[in-house]
Image (tube, coloured by chain):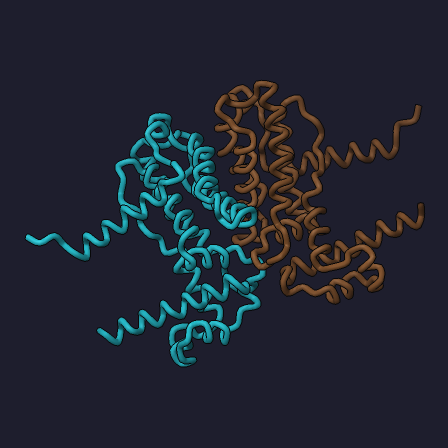
Chain colours: A brown, B cyan
Amino acid sequence: MVKQERAIQTRKTILSAAARVFEGRGYKAATISEILTAAGVTKGALYFHFPSKEHLAQGVLHEQDQWLPVPERACKIQELVDTVMLHAYRLQTDPMVRAGVRLSLDQQAHGLDRSGPFTRWAEILRDLLEEARSQGELLPNVVPAETADVLVGSFAGIQAMSQAVCEYQDLLRRSSHLLRHLLPSVAVPSVLASLDSSESRGETISTELRTLMSQEREPAAG
Amino acid sequence: MVKQERAIQTRKTILSAAARVFEGRGYKAATISEILTAAGVTKGALYFHFPSKEHLAQGVLHEQDQWLPVPERACKIQELVDTVMLHAYRLQTDPMVRAGVRLSLDQQAHGLDRSGPFTRWAEILRDLLEEARSQGELLPNVVPAETADVLVGSFAGIQAMSQAVCEYQDLLRRSSHLLRHLLPSVAVPSVLASLDSSESRGETISTELRTLMSQEREPAAG
């Protein structure tokens, strides 16, 4: 058990180092020996967990698109808003998420399948939209798979623009604007009227999740 | 005059070569000597037009964001749709436009100011939205600068997703879906009802422009 925990820790150390190297140098220019130096682990340990540069990149991509489930909401469109705004907040604050997003947009990463994160995020949002439909939250003409693709694609661009223009400083504002532009074509008016898609939403959810997790770890006595 | 035409042609040859090299290798890995070889011009000619790699990249970025004005429309929102759909069509069909868009999203291009194309496209769309406002085409709550930013950012992502998933094959469909999701939050219903934002719109405008240009070159006799 202790051994397994150590392996998990080593894997995490390697992935953090790989994220830093890929973010700084891009997929193509990055080398395994740079990642090795940055991680400070043995060559054996690195190759045990990740046999190639592509495996390292897929590891980083996977961390990024590991969906952090938001607390369930009665209103599924609110849950979708929460998912997007939490991702924006994590992108601004978590280097691993940032590295994954950058890799998935790295046009020089030939030979690296970058479609995964796009596809998986689209699935998560499509499922939420389908739940929303069954609860009568969607406008009749909405096609969940189409709307999910528009949401994922447009969010990818909003974050790239925010990075190019001001290194993510205005990402939360831009994300909120995007949702306010897209959702009126998606949700019925009564749902729209009750949504919270404000800039601070991502941080609110992040705090809520941390509180929930610490409660799970320390169950109340009695 | 002939000399000037030759200089324009040389500049064009160099930019095409730079576009191919930047697209294939990325900004960071590309070298001036590769561009020199690809262009087949003398070192002196290249340095005369572009004294550095950054100048070459800015040249390619500038070609991309050189706005190809679409024919004027009575409905300014249609002119905006035409602008977006023509850009999508050019992106699919013109390697220079593609290279410029890729450079503006190249996260490894440290030291290259990539905010220009985002900012300039946002200005073009903001101006169209302001004209639309003065003609009563916009919903009252629309802020033209905000909506222009959402349009530019989300389009950048839609094209990146289309590239990552299928090398631009579905770009026109995705662009049309994006507009159909965004415009109901922007334009009044009577404008929406009369818009053509179909997938084939970009090609239609491109043909229209070619016809207009050939008419200008060969004015009808009499």
Q: Which sits in the foreground, A7 or B170?
A: B170
Q: Is residue B25 visible?
A: yes
Q: Is residue B200 left or right of residue A25?
A: left
What residue sits 52% from the left and 41% below the top? A154
Q: Is residue A200 visible?
A: no
Percent of width and height locating residue A106: 59, 55
Q: Is residue A47 left or right of residue B205?
A: right
Percent of width and height locating residue A165: 52, 53
Tell me if residue B111 comes above or below residue B124 in the rendering: below
Percent of width and height locating residue B212: 23, 50
What residue sits 33% from the left and 37% below the top? B78
Q: Which sits in the foreground, B119 or B75?
A: B75
Q: Is residue A153 left or right of residue A128?
A: left
Q: Which sits in the foreground, B177 or A88?
A: B177
What residue sits 53% from the left and 25% below the top? A187
Q: Which sits in the foreground, A186 or A58?
A: A58
The quarter holding residue A47 reads bottom right
Percent of width and height locating residue B118: 46, 51
